[in-house]
């Protein structure tokens, strides 16, 4: 890997605490070898030792058969001056090692009793929307805001894959154990990864394997049609095609994870073409994978993208629930239904998708978007961990019921990584990828504490700067972004196509089903059972009642569920129209303060290239926030005719 690539949260200094100790490693296996190599390099750099006669400061050992049956579990303890990581499986030892790295000197301070560490969610996956060929519209990476792909370049596997190794190391260090290497929108070249170009996938798998990461592949539902002229999932020839093809995949990649499928969605082929259900389609692929231990991630992002905007009864938010709930209990055991965390499309504010809690007999994975398609495209600071924490902690059945994290068989993030020297374009967006892995491991973690971990690893531990500035800029950045963009949960209002910047009516008269219905009297989408689309009825009673009521509905989601007058009074006593004005002015002020705080950071604390990149992005964020403020406020002033109570200029 070239020296100009930023080390993200694993610079050499992050391993100083372990590298300056006397270390014993007991155990064998590929992942244990990875731990040994990490420690050997760190000790060579910082003066510690690996092996020898002891005494030892740190012991990492495999101890088969003593821990709960989960390959990722490890136990950490410290007594008599020795820190011990114990695991039954090599993966547990790998995660235990990185946990000690994360703790730094705290891992060697005092004494603490044995404590098991196990992930709350077994499958923690990053999915790339990378194209092998450069797509004429979406480029090398669809919805990618950090340069090209780390895997592919202009139709071929990259010749230098050293960044893939570095990337795998970063992912393993925060707990990710699965990765999909290509776009869910499978084009002609990408379709060949399943067959004639499988060797490319195997080469990537070889680099991920030492870090405990299983490779997955997005496949086209219609793949068999190229050979058979049909992809009917109930046709015996199609069933045999998937079985034979999958056997060849596992012969090449024995630890292959499985398939990811986007079907009957936004033009992608699916079982509807043959009069079959999504269960029929998913189960055919699942049956082919089952003998090998693989799974199929079947995306539930299915809706009518040719909607008549005049039809107020059709509701894109309802679509996934309407399509899939009748199929509950009919999916195979190794089918994982992959559900976006909100019912629309990764907006800055959406309710939690009701589908997550509506399929008790089906394995469900929750999908979030680390790539900031609708949250500033990595040109804006937007730390997403607080949003994800709210989603994972949401209790669909009421306060006494299980949270979303307890219902999920997996957590998936759409990757925000590219070949940019800073990995994520905006250096501070690295924190989103790190936080995804940590929250997937333990959804109860405080997002601010996770940010502290990232800061400690990336910039070094200790109080003061740059920690104080980073918290000032990042802690509330998601809500700041929300303040100056689409208000009160209504969503979108972005430029069609590329989705960057404001365009209040950009999607209002289109077939995509993303409307705000603003008129002279009010704004918002009526999704109630009483007078609207009935979407509120898809929630369990505890939340259905809350969302149905215009008075009980949380203000931040009001316009998602209700069409209200501009004078409607919110819970804080202000009106909808004044809230729109106030938050958009406040959002710009907050971004200006963020920019000023960053500019005041003493030189040399974060490196000149990183400091300059963040400064450049904050300049753009402020410019964009001003544009959002002026367009949104002008639009609603012209619609409502209501003046700003504070007399501020509205165009």
Image: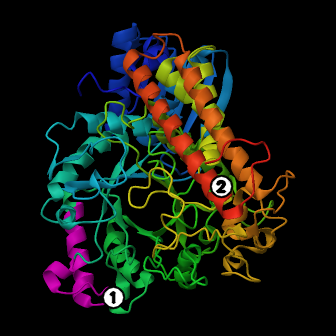
Locate residue 435: give its quadrant. Answer: top right
User: With 643 as the anchor, is 137 left or right in this view?
Assistant: left
Q: Residue at x 47, y 41 (%)?
A: 433
Alpha carbon distance from label 1 to label 2? 39 Å
Write down the region rendered in magenta.
224-250
Q: Residue at x 49, y 31 (%)?
A: 618
Residue furthest to the top: 47
Sequence order check, earlier mark of 1 and 2:
1
Name the residue beneath numbered marker 1.
273
Q: Is residue 73 visible?
A: no
Of circles 1 and 2, the one toward us is: 2
What number is the disc on residue 185?
Answer: none
- Residue 427: x, y in percent? 43, 31
For label 2, the residue is 487
Quadrant holding the N terminus: top left
**Could you say which quadrant of the image residue 77 lies in?**
top right
SS for dot 2 = helix
- 583 shown above or below 281: above
């Amino acid at each position: 890997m070239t020296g100009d690539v930023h080390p993200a949260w694993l610079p050499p200094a992050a391993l100083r605490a372990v590298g300056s100790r006397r270390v014993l490693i007991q155990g064998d296996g590929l992942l244990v070898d990875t731990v040994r190599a990490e420690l050997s390099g760190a000790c060579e750099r910082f003066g510690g030792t690996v092996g020898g006669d002891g005494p030892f400061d740190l012991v990492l050992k495999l101890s088969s058969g003593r821990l709960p049956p989960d390959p990722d579990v490890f136990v950490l303890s410290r007594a008599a001056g020795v820190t011990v990581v114990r695991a039954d499986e090599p993966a547990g030892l790998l995660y235990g090692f990185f946990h000690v790295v994360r703790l730094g000197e705290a891992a060697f301070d005092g004494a603490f009793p044995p404590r098991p560490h196990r992930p709350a969610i077994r499958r923690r996956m990053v999915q790339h929307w990378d194209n092998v060929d450069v797509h004429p519209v979406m480029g090398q990476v669809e919805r990618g805001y950090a340069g090209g792909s780390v895997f592919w370049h202009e139709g071929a596997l990259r010749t230098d894959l050293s960044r893939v190794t570095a990337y795998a190391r970063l992912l393993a260090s925060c707990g990710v154990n699965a990765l999909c290497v290509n776009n869910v929108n499978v084009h002609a070249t990408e379709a060949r990864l399943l067959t004639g170009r499988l060797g490319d996938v195997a080469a990537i798998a070889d680099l991920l394997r030492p870090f405990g990461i299983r490779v997955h592949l997005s496949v086209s539902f219609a793949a068999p049609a190229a050979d058979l002229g049909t992809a009917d999932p109930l046709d015996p020839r199609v069933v045999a095609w998937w079985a034979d093809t999958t056997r060849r995949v596992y012969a090449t990649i024995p630890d292959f994870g499985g398939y990811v499928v986007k079907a009957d969605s936004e033009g992608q082929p699916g079982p509807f073409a043959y009069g079959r259900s999504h269960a029929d389609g998913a189960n055919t692929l699942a049956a082919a994978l089952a003998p090998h231990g693989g799974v199929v991630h079947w995306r539930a992002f299915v809706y009518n993208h040719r909607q008549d905007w005049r039809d107020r009864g059709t509701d894109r938010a309802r679509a996934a629930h309407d399509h899939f709930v009748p199929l509950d209990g009919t999916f195979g055991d190794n089918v994982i239904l992959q559900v976006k965390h909100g019912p629309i499309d990764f907006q800055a504010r959406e309710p939690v998708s009701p589908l997550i809690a509506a399929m008790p007999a089906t394995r469900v994975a929750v999908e979030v978007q680390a790539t900031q398609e609708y949250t500033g495209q990595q040109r804006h600071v937007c730390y997403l961990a607080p949003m994800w924490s709210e989603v994972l902690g949401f209790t669909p059945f009421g306060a006494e019921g299980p949270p979303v994290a307890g219902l999920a068989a997996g957590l998936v993030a759409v990757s925000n990584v590219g070949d940019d020297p800073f990995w994520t374009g905006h250096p501070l967006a690295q924190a989103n990828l790190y936080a995804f892995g940590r929250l997937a491991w333990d959804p109860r973690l405080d997002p601010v504490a996770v940010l502290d971990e990232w800061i400690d690893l990336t910039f070094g531990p200790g109080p003061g700067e740059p920690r104080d500035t980073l918290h000032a800029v990042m802690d509330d950045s998601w809500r700041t972004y929300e303040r100056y963009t689409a208000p009160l949960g209504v969503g979108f209002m972005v430029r069609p196509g590329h989705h960057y910047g404001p365009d209040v009516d950009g999607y209002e008269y289109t077939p995509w089903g993303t409307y705000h219905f603003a008129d002279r009297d009010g704004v918002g989408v009526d999704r109630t059972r009483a007078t609207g689309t009935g979407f509120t009825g898809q929630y369990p009673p505890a939340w259905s009642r809350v969302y149905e009521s215009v008075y009980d509905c949380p203000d931040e989601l009001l316009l998602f569920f209700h069409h209200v007058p501009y004078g409607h009074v919110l819970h804080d006593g202000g009106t909808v129209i004044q809230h729109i004005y106030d938050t958009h002015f406040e959002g710009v002020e907050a971004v200006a303060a963020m920019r000023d705080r960053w500019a005041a950071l003493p030189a040399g604390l974060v490196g000149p290239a990183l400091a300059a990149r963040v400064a450049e992005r904050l300049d753009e964020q402020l410019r964009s926030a001003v544009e959002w403020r002026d367009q949104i406020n002008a639009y609603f002033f012209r619609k409502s005719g209501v003046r700003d109570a504070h007399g501020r200029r509205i165009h």
